[in-house]
Image (cartoon, rainbow, N blue to C red):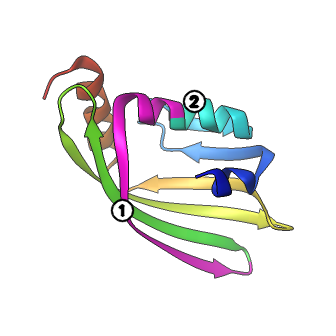
């Protein structure tokens, strides 16, 4: 993770699905760490099981799969994400994030926060 964070522009723009508790457009590396990663990690352990990266002239596309495990209940949720990174001069300027099932992921976070299944 530190290697990824080092490649983010200080003013990186991260656009997450609005349905998620950390959804919306966020600006800045520190905001990304606190608002997005902080919220995700406060609710669940994140285990990435597979990642593929495709590089092209317009940037980098990555697919991530893994499992979230709720801290409160132990519920496991399969995670599938696609991220599109706009890269300039070796620095990530913008990330668009797409999840396979944002409504179900948001419901998982709600259950994790409430401590229910």
Label 2 sits on a secondary structure element that is helix
Q: Which mark is residue 35?
A: 2
Figure quadrant of the C terminus = top left
Q: Residues within 10 Å of mark 1 (few under 14, many from 20)?
A: some
Residue 103 image position (x, y, % from top left): 31, 41
In front here: 97 or 33? 33
**Residue projecting furthest to the left:** 117
Predominant SS of the magenta segment: strand
Residue 73 image position (x, y, % from top left): 17, 29
Check disc 1 and report the residue beneath it.
Answer: 65
Q: Residue at x 60, y 30 (%)?
A: 34
Magenta segment boundaries in residue numbering: 38-57
Residue 106 image position (x, y, % from top left): 33, 35
Can residue 92 be seen from the camera position used here? yes
Q: Residue at x 67, y 32 (%)?
A: 31
Q: Residue at x 53, y 68 (%)?
A: 62
**Residue projecting furthest to the top:** 114
Residue 80 image-quadrant placement: bottom left
Q: Residues within 10 Å of mark 2 (few under 14, many from 20)?
A: some
In front here: 99 or 67? 67
On whether residue 44 falls in the magenta region, the answer is yes
**Residue 29 drawn above or below residue 72:** below
**Residue 111 drawn above or below residue 59:** above
Residue 13 image position (x, y, % from top left): 71, 45
In front here: 41 or 26? 41
Q: Residue at x 29, y 52 (%)?
A: 67
Can residue 100 be seen from the camera position used here? no
On whether residue 68 falls in the magenta region, the answer is no
Q: Is residue 106 left or right of residue 92?
A: left
Label 1 sits on a secondary structure element that is strand
């Amino acid at each position: 993770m530190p290697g990824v964070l080092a490649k983010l522009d200080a003013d990186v723009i991260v656009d997450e699905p609005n349905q998620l508790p950390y959804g919306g457009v966020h600006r800045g590396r520190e905001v990304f760490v606190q608002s997005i990663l902080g919220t995700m990690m406060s609710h669940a352990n994140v285990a990435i099981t597979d990642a593929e990266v495709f590089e092209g002239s317009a940037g980098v596309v990555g697919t991530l799969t893994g499992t979230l495990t709720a801290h409160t209940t132990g519920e496991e949720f399969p995670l599938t994400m696609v991220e599109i990174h706009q890269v300039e001069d070796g620095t990530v300027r913008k990330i668009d994030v797409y999840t396979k099932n944002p409504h179900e992921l948001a419901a998982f976070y709600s259950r994790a926060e409430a401590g229910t299944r």
